[in-house]
Amino acid sequence: MEWIVKDEKFHKNKIEHNGNKYLIGNGYMGYRGTMEEYTKDQLVACNLSNVYDKVGNKWREPVNAPNGLITRLYCNGEPMSVLSGEVLEHEQVLDIKNVVHKRHTIFTTSKGARVEVNSERFLSLSNIHLLCMKYSLRVSEPCSIVLETGIDADVWDINGPHLEELTLRVESDNLLAEAVTHEKRYEVVVAERIERTFGEETIERQQNSILRKISVKAEAGIEYSFVKYVSVFTAQDEEKDCSEAALRSNAVAVEKGYDQLFSDNKELWRQRWEKADVVIEGDDYAQLALRYSMYHLMIIAPTHTGRASIPARGLSGQVYKGAIFWDTEIFMLPFFLHTNPQIAKNLLKYRCNTLDGARRKASEYGYRGAFYAWESQDSGDDACTYFNVTDVFTGRPMRTYFRDKQIHISADVAYAIWQYYLMTGDESLLLEGGAEVIIECARFFYSYAYFNMGKNRYELLDVTGPDEYHERVNNNAYTNAMVRCTLEAVMKVIDLLRTKYKKEYDELEEKIYFEDDIDKLKDMLKRLYVPEPDASTGIIEQFDGYKRLEDITLKELKSRILNPNEYLGGGNGLATATKVLKQADVVLMLNLFKDRYSMEIKKANWEYYEPITEHGSSLSACVYALLAAEIGKVDWAYKYFMKTATIDLTGDSKQYVGTLYIGGTHPASNGGAWMAVILGFAGVNASQDVITINPRLPEKWESIKFKLVHEGQKFEVKITKDAVVIKADNSNSMEETFIIANEKIMCRSGDIKEIRYQ
Ligand code: IFM
C-alpha cells in the first residue's frame, strides 16, 4: 500500500497537478502524468534531459520531444475522452516501486454503452531511449471503434517553438517524427511502433502529427489491446544516425516483447530501491510521502552521462528553464551520496564538465576563477536573466540580482565536491576535474573579496544569500561560512595532490598556474570574516545591518499583500525592508556546519528565525525540519518534514512568482524529505571517518530502517524507540567507526551491533 499513489476520480482542475504528480522518468527523459488523449493544452510533455533550445530572445529551455503516446478513442464516432465524455469510473495510479503509470477509465456513450480503457506505461532503465505502453479497451455493447494513435509533434512549449523542419514518415512498421531544434540544429527523433492483433489500419498525416487510424467492429466483452514502443534519440546521444538508432531500438524492443521489458525494468528498479529504501513503521502516510520523494529523485537522476544534472523542476517540464541550481548540490546530493555514490559522482561530474562556463561568467564580471551559473544548462553559461521577475502591478520586468550576486553557488559546488570525497574516500572525482573546480572557486572568491584594512579582514560585500528577499547585502553569514569551507577544502586538496599525486599536481599547475595563489588563499582563510553568534543572545546576524530592518510578524507582512502573486523581494518588495526572510539562511548554515556550533546557538537561532521565515521557497521547510529535530523540537520537525515530503503529492506550493509560472515537481524538497528523516530524525551525521547516530524519532514512529554507504562500506541501520541496530554488509572490506549514545562502536563485515540509546 505504501508504494501506490492513486486518484480515484477525474477532476478537470487537477490535470496540471497530476501531470507533475504522476510523472515517470529514467534520467534521460520524463513523461508527465497525462492521459493518452491529451495534447499540449493539457501540458503533455516528454521532457528531455540536457537538450536545450532558445528561440529569439526568449528564455533558453529544455526541449519536449514529440509525443509518441497520443491515443484517441472513438466509439460509434463519439470521442471517449475524460475531457469531454461521460466518465463513470476513473483511476490514475502510480506504482512507485516498479515505476509504472496506470490508468483505468470507464466511459458511457450517449446510448448508454460502457467503454472501458486501461493503460500502463513505463520508461526503460536498461534502454533509456525507450518508452513502452500497453493500452486496452472493452465495450459492453457491440460498436464501431476507431483508435487514432501515433506521434503528436505539436508539443507544449513555454518559450518555443523549438522543433523545426519536421518530417513525418513511415519506415519499416514505424512512424517517425524527425525535427531539428531552432538554435543549434540538434536532431530530435521519435520512432513509434505498435503491436496489435485487431482492426484495420490506415495512416493519417496532419501538419504536426502522424497517426495510425485503427478501425474495428468491437464485440461486447472482448478485450482489444495493443502495445506501443516509442524510442527517442537526439544529437546529444552521439549516434551517427538518430533515426536509425530509434528504429533499431524499437526493433530490439519488439524482439524482447512488452512483458519481458516490463519484468527486466521491475528488476532494475528493485535493485535501485534495495540501495535506497527507508522503512518507517507506525506512520503509513509519512512512509508513502518519503518513498514518493525518493522516487522523484531517482527517476530524474541522469546515470547515462556526466554532462547532465538535475534541474530544479526535475524532468517535469520547462519551468525555471530546465536549469540546474544549487538545489542539486545542497538539497539532493546527500540522498545520492549516502545511498548511491556513483550517481552522486555523476552529478558532480556535470560541474567539472561545465567549469569553462563558470570561468566565462567570472571573467565576464571581471573576476578570476570560476563563478558558477545561478541557472546552469548544458554549457555552464548562466541562463538566469537580469530581469527574472515581472512586477504584477506594472507588468514591467524587475531587475533581480540572483545571477550577479548569489556567489554562494560556487561555494556550494566546491562544498559538494569536497563532501563527496569525505563521504566516499574516493579521490577519483578530485583527479577528474574536482580539484580544479575547487581551486578555481577559491580563486574566484579571492578576487571577489574586499580586504577591509581598518578591520584587518576579508569581507564579502554586495552578495545575495539564500534569502533572496534581501539582495545585495554585505557579509551574509551563510555565504561567508561557505566560502571559508571552500578555502579550507582548497588547502586540503592542494595538500593531497602535492603529497599523493605529484604528477597530477604538476599537470594542473601547468594548466592553471595556481601555485602563486596559494599564499593568498591561505591568508584569506586566516582572515576571512564569518559572522559569529552575538555574545548575549547567541543570534547570528544574517548579514550586516539585518538587525536594523523593520521588525514585523509574518502575519503583518501578509496583511500588506495586495496581489497573491506579488514578488516580496527586489527593490520594492514588501519583505525587502523588513526582517522577514524568504527561506532558511542562517539556519541552513547551522545545519551544514553543525559541529561548529553549540546546541544553545542552534536553538536560539531556530527560535529567532523560524517565526519570520516565509518559506516562499520549497527549499526552506526541510531545513527547519532538520534543525528542529536536532534541537529536540521533534513535533516541529515532523510538521516541516511532512510539508516537504508531501509537496508534490498535494500540489501545495507556489505556482507563480510575479507573472512567472513556477509549477512542476520539487526535487530539492524531495531531497530535503530524505535529509529530514535520515539526518534529522535518525540523527545520522557522517564525517570523514566516523558516523554519529543520534536518533529522535517522532512520537508515532515505532522504527525506521534504512541503508547507508560510507567510504564504500554498506550498512543497514534500524532505529527503534530505544535502540540502534547496525548490520554491516558481508562484502565490507573496512572497519567503520560509529558513535551512538557517546559510545564508540566498531563495525566489521558481517557484524550486527545493537546499542541502546535511551
Ligand atoms: O534555488 C532556488 C532558490 O533558492 C529559490 N528560488 C527557486 C530556486 C530553484 O529552486
Image (cartoon, helix red, strand yellow):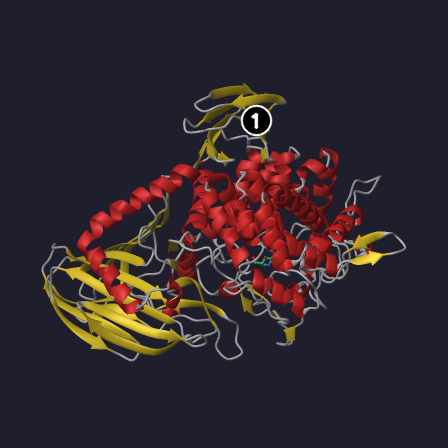
Q: Residues within 10 Å of mark 1 (few under 14, many from 20)?
A: many
In this picture, is 716 found above or below 232?
above
* Quadrant hosting ligand 1: bottom right
Residue situated in front as seen by the camera: 32 or 311: 311
Whether residue 413 is visible to the viewer of this picture, yes or no, is: no
Q: Which residue is mark 1?
A: 738
| Quadrant hosting residue 534 | top right
Q: List the single residue furthest toward the right.
A: 454
Q: Indicate yes or no: mark 1 CB to ligand 1 under 8 Å.
A: no
Q: Secondary structure at mark 1?
A: strand
Q: Position of residue 95 (x, y in %)?
A: 34, 46
Q: At which x and y percent is residue 677?
A: 53, 38
- Above or below, 675 against 227 in this view is above
**Could you tell me residue 642's position as x and y percent?**
53, 43
**Which residue is pictured at 25% across the width and 73% down the height?**
210
Looking at the image, which residue is at 53% across and 72% down?
A: 59
- Please tell me which residue is depicted at 41% across the width and 26% down the height of the picture: 730
- Give the tally of numbered discs: 1
The reply, left or right, for residue 158 in relation to residue 241 is: right
Q: Nearer the viewer, residue 156 or 42?
A: 156
Residue at the location (61% across, 59% down)? 511
Which image quarter is the C terminus in?
top right
Q: Is residue 399 visible?
A: yes
Displayed quadrant of residue 567: bottom right
Q: Is residue 566 left or right of residue 155?
A: right
Q: Is residue 554 above or below residue 593?
A: below
Where in the figure is residue 621, as x and y percent of width and height? 59, 47
The three-letter code of the residue at mark 1 reads Phe
- In the picture, the quarter occupied by the N terminus is top left
